[in-house]
Image (cartoon, rainbow, N blue to C red):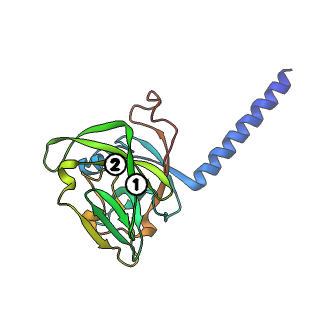
Amino acid sequence: MWRKALRVLVWTVIVVAALCGLAYVFVEPWTVPGDDPHLAVSIEPTLSVGDVLLVTRGTGASDGALVRCADPDAAGRFVVGRVVGHSGDLVELTSGALIVNGKASTASVACDTPVVHLRDPTTQEDEDLTCMLEDFGGGLHAMLRSSKTDAGRDLKVEVEPGKAYLLSDNRAMHLDSRDFMGVVPSTCQRIVGRLSGAAGWFDAHKRLTVLW
């Protein structure tokens, strides 16, 4: 009996080790840093400082993908955003609504937490942001809007050749292509999941989360 149990244990260890090795080939862990207040608020409500993420080792991503890209303005640092356009695409923001090549995304369903309270690192003012589920790129994702800042911040831009256009999930307090005019797609890696949040395994809502 004990020999059978030992064989099962050995094979379980081998299978787990093989799966871990396979995962290592394709993804790498990355912890969201907390030393940039603009990055910290821009990734809400999908991500937060201290989240341990799984990032693909390969580069490139389709529209709607949440990605980590090399910061165009700071060597060795990253920006995080959602890909909304590639070379030649026409990207528009009208009163906070996203329109790509004339097709508008839909955001008519409120998040489970409909209002998110954050401090704007630029103005140091606290603001209540509206959280909506946006249908874009074949999936739903949460994004934040502000009735106070949406007005007067409309955007219409054609994506430069060889670039991808990113938008922060926090549309009001962003760190995205509105700040640095696109990123090079070959520097972008897709964020596919979250292992845990800043509180580790104690936060059941943030551990082992698939991200799209």
Judge whether 60 appears above or below 146 on screen: below
Q: In the structure shown, which secondary structural element does the residue marked by tag 1 occupy?
A: strand
Measuring from the top left, give residue 145's x and y in whole percent: 28, 49
> Between disc 2 and disc 1, whose residue precedes?
2
Residue at the image point whose x is 35% and y is 57% from the top: 78
Foreground tag (2 vs 1) = 1
Residue located beneath label 2 in the image? 43
Judge whether 2 appears above or below 49 on screen: above
Residue at the image point whose x is 28% and y is 70% from the top: 156
The numbered mark at residue 106 is 1
Q: Is residue 74 among the parts visible in the rendering?
A: no
Measuring from the top left, give residue 43's x and y in whole percent: 34, 48
Question: What amino acid type is highlighted by mark number 2?
Answer: Ile
Horizontal relation, residue 20 to residue 33: left or right: right
Q: Give the CA separation, mark 2 to mark 1.
A: 20 Å
Judge whether 56 appears above or below 41 on screen: below
Measuring from the top left, give residue 98's x and y in whole percent: 34, 60
Measuring from the top left, give residue 143's x and y in whole percent: 35, 48
